[in-house]
Image: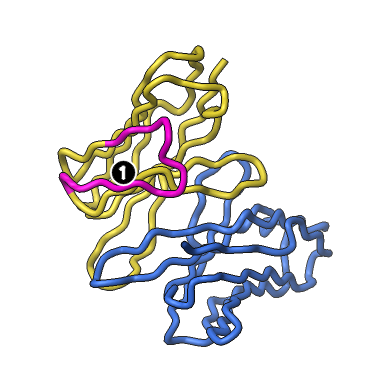
Amino acid sequence: NAGVTQTPKFQVLKTGQSMTLQCAQDMNHEYMSWYRQDPGMGLRLIHYSVGAGITDQGEVPNGYNVSRSTTEDFPLRLLSAAPSQTSVYFCASSSRDGYNQPQHFGDGTRLSIL
Amino acid sequence: GENVEQHPSTLSVQEGDSAVIKCTYSDSASNYFPWYKQELGKRPQLIIDIRSNVGEKKDQRIAVTLNKTAKHFSLHITETQPEDSAVYFCAASRNYGGSQGNLIFGKGTKLSVKP
């Protein structure tokens, strides 16, 4: 199993451009989430999904959009990139079998907005 | 909503010494407390977790303690080694209705183990 796969690993954008960060998992996990990591700020939840067709906002959702059409995929869209969105983005997934299953993280996407 | 505070932000110890990282949380309904280790440029990796029905959990040189009354939990690393050097994150979440709760993370502790 590949686990959680994120693409691309690195990306440079210009202010105002849009793009989609891809996240796929092959563990049949119902729960998926997106975090951003900034120096000294830990990981902050952007959006999450508890299953196909269901998404909700986290702590810092502004400027981002998500959809969940399949169990495997959970893309994150930047609608109009801003320099404040320069960050490392992590996708994570976990099972809903039982309570509080561990979250598995992808390798991250390092995004720079010029 | 939940708020997690983590201290210290940096910690330097000599190889072989113990290291302790402390976290406090605000939501008394939180019932799951994982710890993640993140090496430079890598993904966060779960190293140990504890649920609210347990007061302490150990895994070799790593232990976590939970005080529900005081709403704080701690990570203890004994006999530290240079490869323990990394950033450590605590997190808290609450389960409700059988669904996965969202993890709220502390801001991290950079641990440096000097040989």
Foreground of the two, A13 or A110: A13
Residue in the image at 42% along x and 14% along y = A17
Instruction: Specify the quadrant that holds the C terminus of chain B.
Output: bottom right
Q: Which chain is blue?
A: B
Q: Which residues are magenta?
A: A52-66
Q: Please give the name of the residue rendered at 46% of the width and 86% of the height, measured from the top-left corner.
A: B54
Q: Of B82 and B85, which appears nearest the observer?
A: B85
Which of the chains is yellow?
A: A
- Taking B63 as reference, is A108 above or below it? above
| Residue at image location 63% in from the left, 69% down from the top | B23
Relative height, residue A76 to residue B91 (above, below): above
Picture coordinates of residue B65 (x, y %)? Answer: 58, 81
Where does residue B71 sit, x and y in percent of width and height? 57, 78
Give A76 or A28, whichever is nearer the viewer: A76
* Image vertical order of residue B106 relative to residue B77, above or below: above
Label 1, residues with CA under 10 Å away: few <14, some 14-19, many ≥20? few
Residue A101 placement (x, y as % from top left) = 34, 66
Q: Which residue is mark 1?
A: A2
| Badge 1 amino acid | Ala
In which quarter of the view is residue B80 placed? bottom right
